[in-house]
Structure formats: C-alpha cells, structure tokens
C-alpha cells in the first residue's frame, strides 16, 4: 500500500500543490516563530553573558539614601570598596554609579529609547582606561564638563570628539564636551537605548551623593569559586540593606527573564500559527475528500482485488503523511526566512532586538515537521474513513453514479446545539460586569465559532441562492451555473468558506474591539482635561519645579499648573493623590465642586476628595482621611471639599505642602498648560525653546495624548492583522484549491458546455462567480460572528473601562467585504483560466 | 426497414430539400510530425444535405469521430475547408466558432450530455440560456411531448434513466432549431430498446421536422435508421450506401474488414 500511496501522491502533484502550500505556510509560521524566539533569546543571552563576563560578584545596596526609616542610610562607599577589595581572590572592584541621562540628538529629541537612556561612571583602571567600556576614539571623561558616549548614540547626536553634547538628567539641559566614544555590550544599549559616561564624581553628583556608589562589580582571579566568594563578600558587608550575587547567578537570572520574555512572544505567535494550521485543516480535509471522490473507482478496484478497508485507509493516511512531510520540510526552510524577516520587520517598527545569528535548535525543526505531518494526517483521517466505505462493486458499475448527497440532518442538529450553547454563553457574558468572565467569553466564542462552522453547509444554501439571484441578473447563464455549482456540494462550499470565516471572525472581532476601545480612550483623553498642552519628562524622574514657574512667565501662557502624582494608602487600600496649584487647577481641568469649598484646601491639614472615593470610603466634608505615605509616615487631613470624579485629578486633591515632605526629591510629574486665547498653536515650540531644547521635555497636545493611547491600540491591531494575515492567505489558497479541484472534477461538464456554445469568457465567469460566492459567504459569516462576539465580549471591559462603548466601524467592515470580493476574483484567476483552456474534445471524453 | 415517424409534420423550417447543410472539401487532419505523423483524415470531401439523416461508420481509428469533430467546429483542421451552411469554419475565431456551435449546431454525445445540477428542462434550454434568448414555448412543448419527457422536466439527470437522459440530450439539440445536429455514438451507453427508441426519434426529427442529423456509430443497426451511410477507413471515405438496411451495412463492413486485412 505504501507504493500505491506514493504513486498517488506523485500522480496528483498538481492537484495537491495548493494543499501542500497550505501546510507549508502553516509550518513555516510555526518554525519561523520557534527559530525566531530561540535566536532572539540566544542573542539576548549572548549580550548579557558578555556583559557579565568579568563579574564574579555584584553588590548592590537597596536602602536608597534618605528613604530608610529614621534616615538610616545604607550606601556603598569607598570604605566598602576597600573592604571587598581586600578579600582573597578579588582582582578588582569596580565601583559604579548608574543613572538615567537623556542625550539630545540632532533634533533635540532623546537619542535613546525612553527606558534605555542609561548613564554610568567611567572607571579608569590601569593605564587610565576602563576595560568595561573599550574606547573607540578619544579618551575617558576625567572632568565635570566631559562626557563619553557609546558609538551608536554618538552617531545620533552627530557630534565628534571635541564637540559639545547636550543632555539632561532630570532638570535643565547641560552641555558637555564629548571626549570619547566607547563600545558597550550593555543589552539596554543594543536594544535601542543610549549610554552616557561621566567621571565618577560627576556621576555621583548627578545620580546620587558624593562618595556613594550604586553597585560594586567584583572581579576575581580565574578559577575562583564565585559562590564561595559571594558568601565571603556577604560576610564582610553589614547584614541589612545589601545584596551580593555571583555573576553566574545574575546571568542565570537574566537568562530566565529573557526566556520568560521570549516565550511570551513565542506563545503569542504560536497561537496565530495554530490558527493558520487550523484553517489549513479545512483545506487538507477538502482536498482529500475530493481526491477520494474522484478516485472512488480506483479504490473500489483495489477493494475488489482484495485490499482490506484498513489498507485503503492506511494508504490514504500514508499519502497524507508523505504530503505533510514534504510540505513541512519546505515550510521549515521558509520558516528560517520568516524568522530573519520578522527580526528586521520588528526592528524597523521600533522593537530594538539585539543582533545575532539564527539559531536552529533541533527541537524547532522536529516540532515543525511533527506538526506538519500530524495536522495533515489528522485532517485526512475523516476523508479516509469515507474511502473505506467505498464498496468493491462500484468498480464494476459502468454508469456514472450521481454523487449521493449525504443527509445534513445530524450535522445540522449538532451545529444548532453548538451555536445555541455558544450564543447562550455569550449572552450570559453580557450580564457580567467584570473581567472575571474571560474564560466564559473564550468558551462561548469557541463554541459559537465551532457551531457556525458546523452549520455552514445549511447556511450556505440561502446565501448562495440570494447571491445567485444577483449573479444571474449580472451574468445570466454563467451566474446560474455558478450558483448551481456552489450549491452542489454544500459541505465543500462550507468548508472552503469556513476557512475564510475563521480569519474574518477574528479580524472583525478585534477591529470592532479596538475601534471601540480607541473611541473610549478618545473620550477618556478628552474628558476632564481642558488644558491645551501637557508637559512631561521623557525620563521617569519627573520635572523640576522650575519648569512650571518658567513656563508661567511666558507670554501666551494663561496658566501653567504643576501636578505631582503621589500614591498613598488609606486603610491599606492604595489610592492616588494629586498635589497642585489649587488656585489655578480649574483652568486646566473641568473641576466641579459638589460640596465644601476648594479654597479651604491648603497647607498640610486639608484635602479635597472625589465624590466616588468619598462615597466608597464613607467620607464627607468634615471627616478625616487617614493616609499613609510610601515613606511610612502617616497623616489624617480633614476633607473640606468634594469634587465630581475627574480623570485628571484622581481620588484626592491636595496642596503640595501636604506631600512634599514625603518625597525623595520634589518633582512635578506633569505641567498642564492653558494657552492664552489665540496663542495655542505657537506654544509647543516656545515651550521647548524656553526649556532650552531639553531632550527630556515632552510637549503633548490633547490630540497627541489621544493619539498616543490610540496609537498603541492601533499598533497592536495592525500586528494582529499581520499575524492573522497568514490564516487569511491560507484560506484564499483553500478557495483556489477547491475551485481548481472542482474544475478538474467537472472537466466533462465544462467540455460539454463549451461544445454546446458557452464561450471561454462564460466558463471563466462561471468559475469566478462561484469563487466570489464562496469568499463572500465566508466573509459575511465571519463579519457577522465577529461583530456578535465583539459585542458580547465587550461587556467584560465595562467595569474597568467605563468609557468603552461598542462602535462598529462600518466603513472598515465594508472594506473587508470588498476585499473578500477581490480575493474571490483573484482566487479564481488560475482555476478559471485552466477551465477555459481545457481541450473540449479531451474533456468530453475524459473519465 | 421502415421506421415510424412520431413527429407531426410541420411546415418547412429550413431551406428546401437538397440544399447542403454542411460540407467538407479536401479536409485533412494530421496529428504529430515527422516519424509520428498520423493523418486522421486524408483529403475527405463530403456533403450533408438538409433534412437528411447520415450515419458515419468505420472501424476504430478510421477517423469517423475526427470528421465529425472537425465538421462541428469542435476541432481545427490541418487543411481543406469545412462549412456549415455558407459559413467557412476555418475563417472563424474561437468566439465566433462558439457562437456558431451555440446557434447553428446541436450535439448529442455518447454520455455525459447533461449538467447534473440542472433540471431536465433547464438542460434542454441551456443553449438558449447561454445565448440569452427565450425558448420558443410551442416548439419546446412539441419536442418535449414527442420525446415523452413531459412528466420529467423538473427531474435532475440523476433521477432519469439512461434512455431518458439521452432523450433530454436530443431535446436540447432540437430545441434551438439548429442547422445541423451531430450525434456521437448516441446509443453507445443504452440498452437496445432505449437505443431503438432514441434512433426512432432522431429519424423522426429528420422526417417530420426536416432536421439534418449526422451520426457517428459503429453499430450497423443504428446506421440502418439513416438515409445514407458513409464508410470511413484510414481517414478516407471508402464507400457510401443509400437507404441502408442493417444487413447491408454489416455486409459492407465485413468487406472493408477483409480488404483491410488482405491489403
């Protein structure tokens, strides 16, 4: 039977091409994902390992200056450096100071990514050079006015050694002379960040206190037991407030972190690869069903000459297995291409992955092959059962037997039950008010989708009839023939359309959810804020209070309101407080006082609270609000005003005097700017200029704020489109496949139609219209189910996202349907051409 | 042998008796080149007169089917001329040829004449649907009644017997009142009773409806229904018989066979 299977495979190469392509793309997706995540993981690990190469022990102090109870300051200083240095086996101790410094590029924008703008001290060793940062040009910084940059960042600033570089830490712009350009293995830098190096005293001044370090990096003589050394270091350090870890452990920890991150990317991608493969199953099953129908006489002959049912089934399975093996082997090779492509695509869209070679683990190759073969064999299993049912006597019947259409009653009943269950679960989900119903929503969605897939043959009839009426009007007899062909085998039409439907359900559902969420975010962004601009810092350290003062003095600025965001706990429940200039706050936000008076909020003894928070905590004007700040200190100011819930102002509003004593450094988180009438448009440039072209200053208009939120939702949506694109492509291949196989099956009919006078264009039109009907059927089902699932599932968002309200983007949905139409036409191009090119005489005589 | 004419006599629909419905002149059809060159038809000249029932006979490979295909515009010719009415087929492009087949030619094949998805009636009117023309209701009724298909029009081919299916094919060929009907072994897949019935209808359509029918067959009995039998061998017309009987046809066939063997 193996030989029969192989011969069949070879004989039907052309017919199996599309099926192989479907399997191939699915496995390419899987292997691409696996190879990509392995490679990225290994690239990250490589970077980290190099970075930790000469680290035997790392010592950090976690008691940050000034935050310990009673001012108990645990810091790393020169004395500790000396202590550690004296330990046996230690060759050097590198006292480092780390921090954040934003370097300005040519346009005064940050040269590095927001979270990767790192700074450190340059520690000259023997010969005056720091081995951690090998110099490419110039020398290390030795004075307060000097700086060295990593080579990438230096390139972005456009500065050469000797030029001045502009940068900011958390305050005004500084200018430093670029004295050196270094190389670095720091993963943050290779992932898109920047690195600024200062001499140690300058770094200490900028990021800590003179004489203090943030980390001691201990190097040891080769062969030293890192763990033993770590224990020794721990012994000589004070018990509390310090942490010593061996380089190996750090590497292991980072490696674990990297694994977690890459595996989350990998799993997301694998879900989509799984969807693609699932879609592929429909195509494979369709193909084998058609092949077996076409081959039924051959199979009957095999049975007549003595092959058992089992052998027939096995032959089909072997054929499927071989097909899967070949397709997934090619798919794996294509997957390597996808992995490389993904890398550059993600990098060009700002993901900043480190560079590294492709890593092909044997596991990735094996899983791709296994998945490909398994999926193909699984999909061919049901059709192979049908093959077994072919009776030997069918080989002998001379007359063509009309294909017996098996009853759909059982299938329809199962479909109805599944769909009803799914819809019921989803309707139940709409009654839920929190995100706890996620599992229910997933189950309901899966059930609904499965139910509609099972019901699709039943649904195809009215749809095709309706569409057929239009087709007949448009193109007469070709439309009629196309309608009849689409109706001829509802299972086939349904399976082909279902493949497309799955992709479109997901795409529509996600689109509706994303557009609705965007609308909600839009409302949120517009809500409450009446300021024209929001000024924030690119570094998470906030803005110096000077900024608000300076901006207030500018002409064209009607109000400049600094806002400090402070967290606190009340009876162990965390809440947010905004400390601001209360006399001006109503100019930048829509503040409605519902009780008490805002003017009484002043000093350290009084606060205003949001109405919702007041209600929840039983507060009213006159009651005391017990607070515990994150420095551990407590306060119990009196509530003197209540305001309507306000997004800008969080739960509690207070004067800066209340919170400033609890802050490490007094910093504004944002400054809200109201422009003088008619001055709004010119302000952003002026603000930047006023603040000295500071790269950490971000000025956002209301539109910018909305867009930044909406933008990230859109980015995710487009990524999803991209990932679901593969499933759609496979579904389209499925349409091509079904049509091509149908054309083959109907060769004689087509020959006869040509003989009695249907022109080639008519034949083409017939195939094209059938294709469009199938595609549109899939698309309409998908859009319908997608909207329903988005509507019902969307209810889960309402508690955490009250502004969420379902919006159906009809224009975009219309575009999807239009695309499905185009896809239908395109999918028919090749089968239609084949049909039109058939040799009439051979066709009529064909078996 | 005389055959009953089931069709009522209708007024002449076409040009008078004796004019030529289709004609081949020096028709050759060559397959392959050089060593593998095979002449399926070798300078065949033949005329088919209106309202005449012609049978083309000959052993396998004699070129009888090729002749029919070439004359019906289903296949191209290597040299020579083929005409249907006054139209030279070689001068027509694929589009015009298709239209000609649709409007002027009727076909009955050995098997698989019908689209399984269409009802009998839809199959019958298919050529007119393709042309976008309305069927002549009265004519259609007449054909359907004569062929005994009245009760079967809503059935699909799979619900009809083989004989009924071929009768639907005959009805389709007749429905658009073509210039000429080509039938390729129309009884090949039928039992003898259904076959005789079908041939009776074809014969009748020639007599009563003045249709022109050309039928390829290898069955002497089938040929005996024709007005005229043309014998082909090795791509040439080797003989012709008028008012044939089955025995006479068989006799001639035997002669060619013998000749073929001895020559």
Image: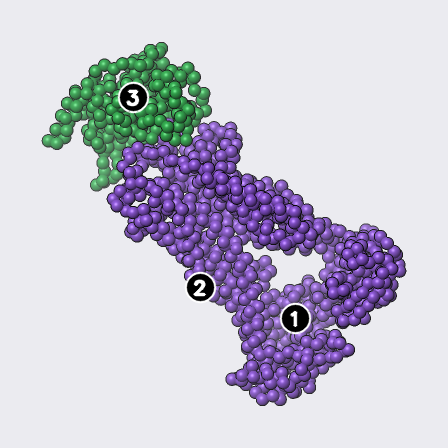
- Please name the residue that numbered disc 1 is placed on: A118
Image chain in purple = A
Q: Quadrant of residue A694?
A: bottom right
Q: Name the residue carrying label 3.
A: B198
Circle 3 residues within 10 Å: few <14, some 14–19, many ≥20: many
Distance from disc 2 to disc 3, alpha carbons, whole Å, reads 69 Å
Chain at tag 3: B
Residue at x 59%, y 66% (from the top left corner): A191
Q: Given the image, what chain letter belongs to the residue carrying mark 1?
A: A
CA gap, disc 2 and disc 1: 37 Å
Q: Earlier in the sequence, mark 2 or mark 1?
A: 1
Q: Which secondary structure lies at badge 1?
A: strand
* Disc ID at residue B177: none
Chain letter for the green part? B
Q: Residue at x 63, y 54 (%)?
A: A436
Callout 2 and callout 1 share a chain? yes
Residue A214, percent from left and from top: 67, 77
Q: Nearer the viewer, mark 1 or mark 3?
A: 3
Total tally of numbered discs in the picture: 3
Say whether residue A339 is visible.
Answer: no
* Residue highlighted by disc 2: A363
Q: Position of residue B216 (x, y in %)?
A: 26, 26
């Amino acid at each position: 039977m193996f030989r029969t299977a192989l011969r069949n495979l070879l004989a039907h190469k052309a017919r199996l091409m599309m099926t192989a392509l479907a399997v191939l793309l699915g496995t390419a997706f899987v292997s691409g994902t696996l190879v990509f995540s392995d490679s990225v993981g290994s690239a990250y690990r490589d970077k980290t390992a190099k970075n930790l190469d000469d680290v035997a022990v790392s010592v950090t102090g976690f008691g940050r200056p000034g935050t310990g109870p009673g001012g108990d300051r645990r810091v790393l200083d020169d004395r500790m450096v000396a202590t550690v240095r004296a330990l046996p086996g230690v060759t050097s101790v590198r006292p480092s100071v780390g921090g954040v410094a934003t370097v300005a590029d040519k346009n005064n924008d940050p040269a590095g990514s927001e979270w990767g703008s790192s700074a450190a001290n340059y520690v000259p060793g023997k010969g005056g050079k720091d081995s951690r940062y090998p110099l490419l040009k110039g020398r290390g910084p030795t004075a307060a006015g000097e700086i060295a940059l990593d080579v990438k960042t230096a390139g972005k600033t456009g500065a050469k050694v000797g030029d001045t570089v502009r940068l900011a830490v958390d305050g005004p712009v500084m200018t430093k002379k670029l004295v050196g350009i270094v190389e670095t293995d720091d993963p943050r830098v290779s992932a898109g960040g920047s690195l600024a190096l200062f001499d140690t005293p300058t770094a200490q001044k900028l990021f800590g206190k003179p004489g203090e370090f943030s980390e001691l990096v201990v190097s040891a003589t080769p062969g030293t037991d890192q763990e033993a050394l770590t224990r020794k270091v721990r012994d000589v350090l004070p018990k509390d407030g310090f942490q010593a870890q061996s380089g190996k452990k750090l590497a292991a920890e980072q490696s674990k972190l990297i694994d977690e991150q890459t595996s989350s990317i990998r799993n997301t991608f694998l879900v989509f690869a799984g969807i693609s493969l699932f879609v592929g199953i429909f195509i494979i099953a369709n193909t084998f069903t058609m092949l077996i129908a076409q081959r039924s006489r051959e199979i009957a002959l095999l049975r007549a000459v003595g092959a058992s049912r089992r052998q027939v089934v096995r032959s089909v399975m072997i054929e499927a297995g071989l097909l899967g093996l070949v397709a997934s082997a090619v798919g794996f090779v294509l997957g390597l291409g996808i992995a490389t492509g993904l890398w550059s695509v993600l990098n060009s869209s700002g993901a900043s992955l480190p560079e590294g070679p492709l890593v092909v683990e044997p596991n990735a190759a094996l899983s791709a092959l296994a998945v490909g073969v398994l999926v193909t064999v699984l999909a061919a299993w049901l059709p192979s059962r049908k093959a077994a049912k072919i009776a030997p006597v069918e080989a002998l019947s001379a007359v063509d037997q009309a294909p017996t259409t098996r009853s759909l009653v059982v299938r329809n009943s199962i479909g109805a039950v599944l769909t009803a269950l799914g819809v019921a679960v989803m309707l139940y989900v709409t009654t839920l008010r929190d995100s706890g119903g996620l599992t229910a929503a997933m189950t309901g969605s899966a059930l609904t989708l499965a139910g509609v897939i099972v019901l699709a043959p039943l649904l195809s009839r009215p749809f095709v009839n309706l569409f057929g009426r239009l087709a007949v009007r448009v193109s007469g007899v070709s439309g009629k023939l196309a309608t009849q062909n689409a109706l001829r085998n509802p299972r086939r039409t349904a399976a082909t359309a279902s493949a497309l439907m799955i992709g479109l359900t997901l795409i529509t559902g996600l689109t509706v959810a994303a557009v609705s969420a965007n609308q909600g975010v839009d409302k949120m962004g517009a809500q409450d804020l009446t300021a024209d601009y929001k000024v924030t810092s690119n570094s998470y350290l906030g803005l110096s209070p000077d900024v608000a003062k300076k901006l207030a003095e500018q002409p064209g600025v009607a109000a400049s309101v600094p806002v400090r965001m402070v967290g606190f706990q009340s009876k162990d429940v965390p809440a947010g407080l905004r400390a601001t200039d209360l006399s001006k706050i109503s100019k930048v936000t829509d503040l409605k006082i519902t009780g008490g008076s805002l003017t009484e909020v002043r000093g350290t003894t009084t606060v205003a609270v949001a109405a919702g928070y007041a209600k929840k905590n039983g507060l009213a004007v006159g009651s005391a609000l017990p607070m515990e700040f994150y420095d551990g200190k407590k306060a119990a100011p009196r509530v003197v005003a209540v305001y309507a819930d306000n997004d800008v102002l969080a739960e509690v509003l207070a004067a800066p005097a209340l919170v400033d004593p609890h802050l490490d450094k007094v910093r504004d988180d944002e400054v809200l700017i109201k422009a003088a009438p008619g001055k709004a448009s010119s302000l952003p440039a002026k603000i930047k200029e006023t603040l000295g072209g500071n790269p950490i200053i971000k000025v956002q208009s209301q539109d910018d704020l909305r867009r930044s939120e909406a933008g990230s939702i859109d980015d995710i949506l487009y990524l999803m489109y991209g990932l679901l694109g593969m499933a759609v492509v496979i579904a389209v291949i499925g349409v091509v496949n079904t049509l091509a196989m149908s054309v083959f099956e109907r060769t004689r009919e087509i020959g006869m139609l040509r003989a009695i006078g249907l022109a080639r264009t008519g034949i083409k039109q017939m195939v094209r219209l059938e294709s469009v009907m199938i595609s549109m059927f899939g698309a309409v089902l998908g859009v319908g189910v997608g909207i329903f699932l988005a509507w019902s599932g969307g209810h889960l968002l309402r508690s955490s996202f009250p502004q969420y309200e379902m919006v159906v983007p009809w224009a975009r949905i219309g575009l999807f349907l239009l695309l499905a139409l185009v896809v239908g036409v395109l999918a028919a191009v090749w089968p239609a051409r084949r049909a039109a090119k058939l040799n009439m005489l051979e066709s009529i005589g064909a078996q | 042998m005389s055959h009953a004419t089931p069709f009522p006599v209708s007024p002449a629909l076409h040009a008078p008796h004796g004019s030529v419905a289709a004609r081949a002149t020096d028709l050759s059809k060559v397959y392959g080149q050089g060593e593998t060159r095979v002449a399926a038809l070798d300078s065949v000249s033949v005329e088919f007169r209106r309202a005449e029932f012609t049978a083309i006979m000959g052993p396998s490979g004699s070129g009888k089917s090729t002749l029919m295909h070439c004359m019906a515009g289903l296949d191209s010719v290597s040299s020579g001329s083929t005409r249907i009415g006054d139209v030279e087929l070689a001068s027509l492009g694929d589009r015009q040829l298709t239209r000609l087949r649709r409007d002027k030619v009727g076909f009955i094949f050995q098997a698989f004449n019908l689209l399984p998805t269409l009802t009998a009636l839809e199959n019958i009117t298919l050529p007119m649907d393709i042309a976008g023309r309305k069927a002549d209701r009265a004519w259609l009724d007449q054909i359907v009644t004569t062929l005994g298909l009245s009760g079967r029009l809503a059935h699909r081919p799979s619900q009809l017997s083989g004989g009924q299916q071929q009768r639907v094919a005959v009805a389709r060929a007749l429905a658009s009142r073509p210039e000429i009907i080509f039938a390729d072994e129309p009884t090949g897949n039928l039992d003898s009773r259904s076959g005789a019935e079908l041939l009776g209808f074809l014969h009748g359509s020639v007599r009563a409806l003045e249709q022109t029918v050309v039928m390829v067959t290898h069955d002497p009995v089938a040929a005996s229904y024709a007005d005229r039998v043309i014998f082909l061998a090795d791509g040439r017309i080797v003989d012709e018989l008028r008012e044939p009987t089955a025995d006479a046809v068989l006799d001639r066939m035997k002669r060619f066979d013998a000749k073929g063997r001895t020559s």
